[in-house]
Image (tube, grey):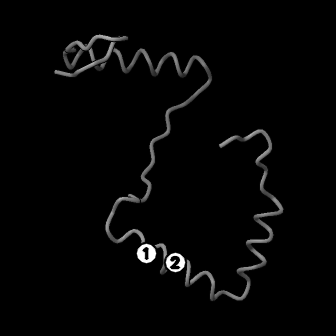
Amino acid sequence: MLWARDRDRLHVMTRDAGRQSVERYRERMRAAGFRLVQLWVPDIRAPLFPRECRRQSRLASRQAHESEVLDEIEALHDDEGWTA
C-alpha cells in the first residue's frame, strides 16, 4: 500500500493505483515539454564526503592552470534571471 496526500486528508493507495498516478503525472509532464532524467549524484550525507571534497579541492589547487580555468568559468557563467 502507498500513502498519498490529497489536500488535507491522507488515504491509502494500492500499488497499481500508485503506478497509474505516477504514469499520469509523467504523461502530463511530457505533454508540457519535459522529459524524465534520472542520475546518480554524490551523497553529501555520506561520512566520507567532506574528506573527498577536500582531497579533490587540494588536487585542483595544485594544478598550474587552475586559476585560468576558474577565470574562464567565471567569464562564461550566465546567471541572469536566476534567483536564490
Assign the C terminus to one quadrant of the image. top right
Residue located at (45% from left, 48% from top): 39
Residue located at (77% from left, 56% from top): 77
Q: In this view, does 38 lie to the left or right of 35?
A: left
Say if 77 sits above or below 35 in the image.
Answer: below
- Residue 47 rendering spot, x and y as whole percentages: 31, 68
**Residue 50 image-quadrant placement:** bottom left
Residue assigned mark 1? 52
- Residue 63 rendering spot, x and y as whole percentages: 66, 86
Assign the N terminus to one quadrant of the image. top left
Q: Which amino acid does label 1 sit on?
A: Glu
Say if 2 sits above or below 36 in the image.
Answer: above
Residue assigned mark 2? 56
Name the mark on residue 10: none
Q: In this view, does 73 lie to the left or right of 25?
A: right
Q: Which amino acid does label 2 sit on?
A: Gln
Residue located at (19% from left, 15% from top): 14
Q: Distance between the residues labelled 2 and 1?
A: 6 Å
Q: Residues within 10 Å of mark 2 (few under 14, many from 20)?
A: few
Say if 23 sits above or below 84 in the image.
Answer: above
Are discs 2 and 1 less than 8 Å apart at CB? yes
Query: 15 or 51, which lies in front?
Result: 51
* Secondary structure of residue under mark 1: helix
